[in-house]
Amino acid sequence: MTRRIETALLVDDDDAFRTTLQGALRRRGVVARTAATIDEGLVALEYEPVDLVVIDYRMPRGDGLSALAQYRKLQPDAAIVMLTGFGDIPLAVAAMREGADTLLSKPVDADKLLREAASLRDRQRPPPSASAAPTPPPGSLKLDDLEREAIRAALRESGGVVATAAKLLGIDRRTLQRKLKKLGG
């Protein structure tokens, strides 16, 4: 059974985006609060827990990535979604390592955000010492999918030249060739 998202905290420095998403969530029955800074969000969570934390990656006074561990400590059972307009594989990996459950690209659709967050809450979070990786919920971003998309984008940008695409990705040409073979492309 899917656990409904009833409360949310949106942490983003973009006033227009933050209030638009807040309104969309409220229209869907979610009690959504907002914070314009990392610190504001942390203070808000100390007084009132939430089911969902949405935090922007790039913010002027501290990035969301460096604050994820603090948010996770305050809200261990909440679904934490990092939003970015600059998504790439290393960022996705770093976000998961620091405590995010998933990384979504801006602009985000409120319905997709709520579906993703509800499925994340349904998944039982393993204890920090558990070595087995959790099975991602259906429709979530998977590392292989992110990697495949980054490789395709680099190949498009480089006109299909593997050596140039490898430079764009910051990896060795031979590594890219192995990844292409593995991914079937």
Image (cartoon, rainbow, N blue to C red):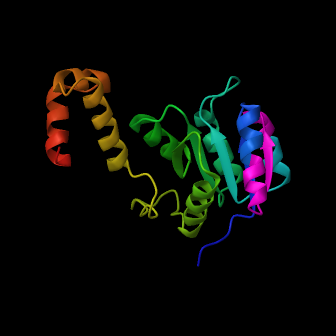
Front residue (pair 88, 124): 88
How many badges with numbers are in the image?
0
Q: Is residue 42 visible?
A: no
In the rendered image, residue 160, in percent from the top left (x then y), is placed at 19, 28
In which quadrant will I find the N terminus? bottom right
Residue drawn at (75%, 64%), measured in percent from left and top?
6
Front residue (pair 118, 76): 118
Residue drawn at (70%, 60%), measured in percent from left and top?
51
Please identify the quarter of the rendering in which residue 178 is found.
Answer: top left
Residue sitting at the far right: 47
In the rendered image, residue 15, in percent from the top left (x then y), is placed at 76, 33
**26 horizontally vs 141: left or right:** right
In the rendered image, residue 41, in percent from the top left (x then y), is placed at 77, 41
**10 horizontally vs 120: left or right:** right
Q: Height in image: 103 above or below 65?
A: below
In which quadrant will I find the C terminus? top left
Q: Which residues are magenta?
A: 22-41
Please identify the quarter of the rendering in which residue 5 is found.
Answer: bottom right
**115 horizontally vs 134: left or right:** right
Q: Is residue 40 visible?
A: yes
**23 horizontally vs 168: left or right:** right
In the rendered image, residue 3, in percent from the top left (x then y), is placed at 64, 72
User: Is residue 132 part of the magenta span, yes or no?
Assistant: no
